[in-house]
């Protein structure tokens, strides 16, 4: 019960990021490869000769860009466009719960961030959230 009271106190006292009854979530970046150049300006040069498709470093990318701009061949390299998107990982009642999750599992995540989503019209979430807050004494 002490842990529930602690969560309720954090909910009551945290910065809600100008969001009514937020659901704090952890997200991570996911890169989608193979996007048409018509839909993305982001690209990387991938080494195709060995089959491991590693990205070119900045110096090699500049060299390949110059060749590509001059309509010259880039043997062993392919220009591949991508889009980075944010993907849901987990939800928490508090921002500190998200930070604890990242501290424990960040090594498995790619560029994680904490984001506040709305719980608008989510009666289940709001009911549990209100119950946790009710366990705390507002005078604490």
Image (spheres, helix red, strand yellow):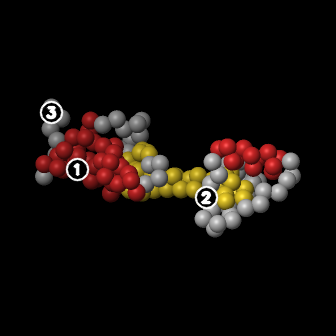
Foreground mark, 3 or 1?
A: 3
Percent x, y of residue 103: 32, 48
Q: Earlier in the sequence, mark 1 or mark 2?
A: 2
Q: Which corner quadrant of the image does residue 21 belong to? A: top left
Percent x, y of residue 73: 82, 57
Identify which residue is drawn at 83% across, 47% down: 69
Marks 1 and 2 close (CB-CB < 8 Å): no
According to the image, label 1 marks what residue?
131
User: Do we see residue 112 in this rendering?
Assistant: yes
Q: Secondary structure at mark 2?
A: loop
For the residue carrying disc 1, how many other residues have a C-alpha within 10 Å: few (<14), some (14-19), or many (20+)? some
Q: How many marks?
A: 3
Give the side of residue 82 with respect to residue 90, left or right: right
User: Do we see residue 119 in this rendering?
Assistant: no
Q: Earlier in the sequence, mark 3 or mark 1?
A: 1
Identify which residue is drawn at 47% across, 48% down: 111
Identify which residue is drawn at 30% across, 48% down: 100
For the residue carrying disc 2, how many other residues have a C-alpha within 10 Å: few (<14), some (14-19), or many (20+)? few
According to the image, label 3 marks what residue?
140
Percent x, y of residue 130: 26, 47
Give the side of residue 73 with respect to residue 87, left or right: right
Q: Which mark is residue 45?
A: none
According to the image, label 2 marks what residue?
54
Percent x, y of residue 80: 70, 57
Q: Estimate the spatial distance between the alpha carbons at disc 2 and disc 3, rounded to whole Å.
A: 55 Å
């Amino acid at each position: 019960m002490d842990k529930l009271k602690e969560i309720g106190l954090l909910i009551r006292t945290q910065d809600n990021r100008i969001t009514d009854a937020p659901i704090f979530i952890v997200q991570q970046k996911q890169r989608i490869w193979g996007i048409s150049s018509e839909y993305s300006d982001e690209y990387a040069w991938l080494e195709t000769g060995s089959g491991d498709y590693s990205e070119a470093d900045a110096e090699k990318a500049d060299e390949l860009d110059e060749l590509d701009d001059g309509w010259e061949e880039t043997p062993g390299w392919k220009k591949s466009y991508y889009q980075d998107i944010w993907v849901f990982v987990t939800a928490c009642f508090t921002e500190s719960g998200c930070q604890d999750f990242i501290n424990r599992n960040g090594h498995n995540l790619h560029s994680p961030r904490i984001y506040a989503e709305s719980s608008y019209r989510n009666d289940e979430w709001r009911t549990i959230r209100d119950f946790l807050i009710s366990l705390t004494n507002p005078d604490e």
